[in-house]
Image (cartoon, rainbow, N blue to C red):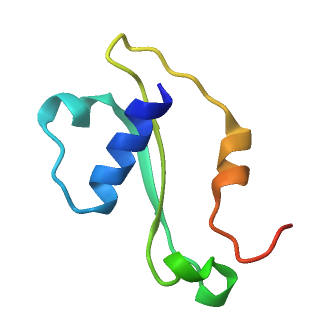
Amino acid sequence: MHNFWTALLNDLYQGIELDAKRQQQLISLFKLHFDNPQDMRADVQGKPVYLGLAMNEQGLLKLKPQYLLLNLPLSQEV
């Protein structure tokens, strides 16, 4: 599941259009913008952060909200 989700978000981030099958796997997708780009890691400052939920090809959804907190590109630990 992780590789599927990583590949999907990487494609979106790089501006690659998703085919209809992959679009149907998306349950929700949000784009996060930081008001203060200095709060972001230097390597991604000013770029959007995608937050999303998707199911795999078998229709399985695994929700691990801790990943959201651990993977935000913050410049400092909270």
Q: Position of residue 65 (x, y in %)?
A: 69, 39
Q: Is residue 68 left or right of residue 11?
A: right
Q: In the displayed structure, would residue 36 be above or below residue 57?
A: below
The percent coordinates of residue 38 (x first, y second) are: 65, 89
Q: Which residue is depicted at the point 43% across and 42% down?
A: 6
Q: Position of residue 34 (x, y in %)?
A: 58, 79
Q: Is residue 35 above or below residue 68?
A: below
In the rendered view of the protein, which quadrant contains the C terminus? bottom right
For the question of whether residue 36 can be seen, the reply is no
Q: How many marks?
A: 0
Q: Is 28 situated left or right of 39 in this image?
A: left
- Determine the image quadrant of residue 14: bottom left
Above-or-below relation of 37 to 33: below
Side (left or right) of 70 relative to 60 = right
Identify the image quadrant of residue 27: top left
Question: Residue at the location (69% across, 71% down)?
Answer: 74
- Residue extending farthest to the top is 58
Residue at 38 percent of width and 14 percent of height: 59
The answer to whether residue 24 shows anywhere in this view is yes
Q: Residue at x 59, y 87 (%)?
A: 37
On screen, residue 75 versus residue 17, left or right, reads right
